[in-house]
Amino acid sequence: MGQLQAGTGRTDVTPGLGCHIAGHFEDRIAEHIRDPLYVKALALSDGETTIGLITADLIYVSSQITEEAKNMIAARTGVPPHCVMISATHTHTGPAVRAVLGTPAEPEYAETLPKKIADAFIMAYNQRCPAELAHTSGHCPEEVHNRRWHMKDGSVRMNPGYRNPDAIRPAGPTDPELGVMILREKGSRKPLAVYANYPLHYVGNDRHCWISADYFGEYAAALQRIAGDSFMVIMANGCQGNINNCDFTRPARKSIDPYHKQRRVANVIAAETWKQWMLLREDDFVDQLTMAATLKMLPFQRRRASAEDLAKAEKLIAANDRSSAMEWVYANELIKLEKDMPLSWEVPLHAMRVGDLGIVGLHGEVFVEIGLAIKEQSPFERNLVVGMANGSSGYIATDQALREGSYETRLCRHVCAPPGTGPAWIAAAVSALNELKE
């Protein structure tokens, strides 16, 4: 335990026009830049251990990129890789760091990311100052909805449509918790940073070919506007694999402009953040605490297409049958999965301790049930569970969802986690948190 020091840093990773935009089933080309994309970094130290929390306004950051960035950080600061967690917000109007669902990758852009990520943290590390920290939780149930629904025909469907008479009930829970960590300068009490965590897939806009940080950037602007001050604001996404903000029990909302939806949601969550911040007491802020981190490598053996499904895909491609754009995309995905991806690899699972706050980083778009289980079983009273951390193995569905089917379980390069992945990750995360608690 020692005197807390904290610093912040930021680099601009906005791509140029003409880049491929990831996040839809069709390839989109950037025509305009609505707002910049950033890498944002926090450096927190207790005098002995320094940890880094870094988030990029991207749909995805590969394991290779994160490893390169961490090695640069270690070389220039001495902070070891297991003490630095790098996650992506999962904006759907940013550049394609990798190829997915018919969208080509931007390899030259991806090559620029490790240094920019490292630079953001190094600036944060160099600007550390005596600080105080508090953490709290808000409750935003109105903006999280399970997007998988049980249908009258016995199927489970993602996004069944607003007020669909054939939709019976959601196929899973939600997690309405908004976790918030607040840092301020010691003495002056000037805000340094807010690191928030909320399990909401993304909230986009109607300008599909305009670069934007989506609601993640909008949240940062809204919170600073409410606070009337300038400081670092990071929204680290949570376990959102089956969660969005669409309430299918009610009619669709009317948007008054292309960015109304993401702005509205950001305002709601920023307002709840501010409320909980203002409810904190002075003695909730501490300047003496313990930092710790551990990074565990877990085995991952992907699912494989059956011989029959692979033969169908190859036949469709050979016939150049594009009558169904979606089936064409999935046929290509199966072939590339089989030819280009290894059968097994290791994935990182991150656990950190910031005083009496537990932080977990999971390697993908993890279903909300997994995050809820980690929070319930954790030895820490409050936990931030961050998805898309240190790369991504795509959707990590529950075993129940794998049996039910639908989009998040259909085999492709970003949906290939086998049954048993969720329970294994829960057990590993809870074990790691227990080690840090002890």
Image (tube, helix red, strand yellow):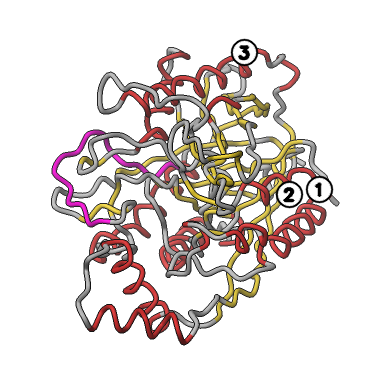
C-alpha distance separating marks 1 and 2 = 5 Å
Question: Residue at position x 52%, y 62% from top?
Answer: 409
Residue 356 percent location from the top left of the image:
77, 38
Question: Residue at position x 35%, y 37% from top?
Answer: 204
Q: Is residue 365 above or below residue 412?
A: above
Which label sits in the foreground, 2 or 3? 2
Inspect the image, locate mark 1, and give the three-letter code of the amino acid beneath it.
Gln
The image's mark for residue 408 is none
Q: Quadrant of the N terminus?
A: top right
Residue 249 percent location from the top left of the image:
52, 29
- Residue 324 occupies which quadrant of the picture? bottom left
Write the start and end of the magenta stretch as one range. Answer: 26-41
Image check: 230 left or right of 361?
A: left
**Towards the viewer: 340 or 166:** 166
Residue marked by disc 3: 278
Question: Do the numbered discs 1 and 2 sit on residues whose CB atoms are within 8 Å?
Answer: yes
Which label sits in the foreground, 1 or 3? 1
Q: Is residue 243 above or below residue 361?
A: above
C-alpha distance separating marks 2 and 3 = 28 Å
Residue marked by disc 1: 377
- Residue 203 occupies which quadrant of the picture? top left
Residue 62 percent location from the top left of the image:
42, 63
**Towards the viewer: 345 or 191:** 345
Question: Of callouts 1 and 3, which one flags the residue occurring earlier in the amino acid sequence?
Answer: 3
Question: Residue at position x 59%, y 39% from top?
Answer: 168
Residue marked by disc 2: 374
